[in-house]
Image (spheres, helix red, strand yellow):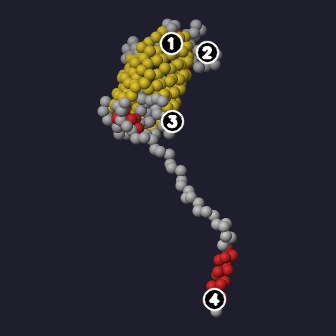
Amino acid sequence: MRVLLGVSLLTIATAAYADPPGSAMPPQPSIVAAPAPAPPPPASGDLDRLASNDAASSRGFVFDSGSVLHAGEVETSLRTIIETGSALSLAVGVGGGVQLSVDGLYGQDGRYEALGGQVRMRVLGGPRYAVSIAAGYHWASSSLDEGEPTNGSFLTFGGDLALAVSDRVLLSIGLGVSHFSGDNNMTEVEDPVGVAGHIDLAELPDPSTDVIGHVGLVVGRSWVRLLAEVGDIGDAYGLVGARLATRHVSVDLGVGAVTGEGFSSPAVVFGLSGRP
């Protein structure tokens, strides 16, 4: 009797908490978490592999390397010639082999300033090489003090080849033109120093066109790489040094000289590049 009473009470309690007939919820499909975003595709060639662990892969000491940032990639760069001047730039890959950049240049003690931007487009490419063209425009001034007139502007156009000679050597070759156009309200300054470190913009003929170019070399694929570059920016220059390269931060340190009426004193060059 006690057992029958206990079973009856348990049956009643269970029925009291049970859903009424027909109200049972149909089985629900299991919830599946959304898949994580796919990782970026692996490097497909020597050129991509050399660039994948170098936050400064699109830059040499002075000129761009010719490599173009992929869509969504952002690179900031600071280049400094100690006791001479600095350049700060921001570049963004917008897709379709196109890269946009803005930059500002400052010559110490107000000897030279410029502000502008550039569009670079990759026109040919393969696992070991990339060919790109670039066009840029910069406003230039001998001084940024309020009330000083703008000296003029530079329009640049050129092409670059980035070539992975091997899985450890990146060669960069560039050639272009720089066209200067100035106003007629130039103010002379004592001991003028300009774009190449020897002439003031006001002393350039209006207009004037110069051929510019460079050859750069980055050797190595570890976190320490050899960096060398020679070129012409109105005066010939040469630089050699080392790059401490990582995926998110790269540091360049080297020495170089510029020709003019003679060789300049050796100058220390510092570069810092970063990518998120």
Q: Which of marks 1 and 3 is in front?
A: 3
Identify the residue at image location x=32%, y=35%.
Answer: 167
Examine the image and state in which quarter residue 61 appears.
Answer: top left
Q: How crowded is mark 3: few (under 14 residues within 10 Å), some or many (20 or more)?
A: few
Amino acid marked by disc 2: Glu
Q: Mark 2 points at which residue?
A: 148
Q: Nearer the viewer, mark 2 or mark 4?
A: 4
Circles 4 and 3 in contact, beta carbons < 8 Å: no
Q: Earlier in the sequence, mark 2 or mark 3?
A: 3
The span from disc 4 to disc 3 (Cα, nearest Å) is 74 Å
Residue 193's spot in the image, x, y percent? 49, 15
Amino acid marked by disc 3: Gly
Q: How crowded is mark 2: few (under 14 residues within 10 Å), some or many (20 or more)?
A: few
Indicate which disc residue 4 carries. Answer: 4
- Front residue of 134/273: it is 134
Amino acid marked by disc 4: Leu
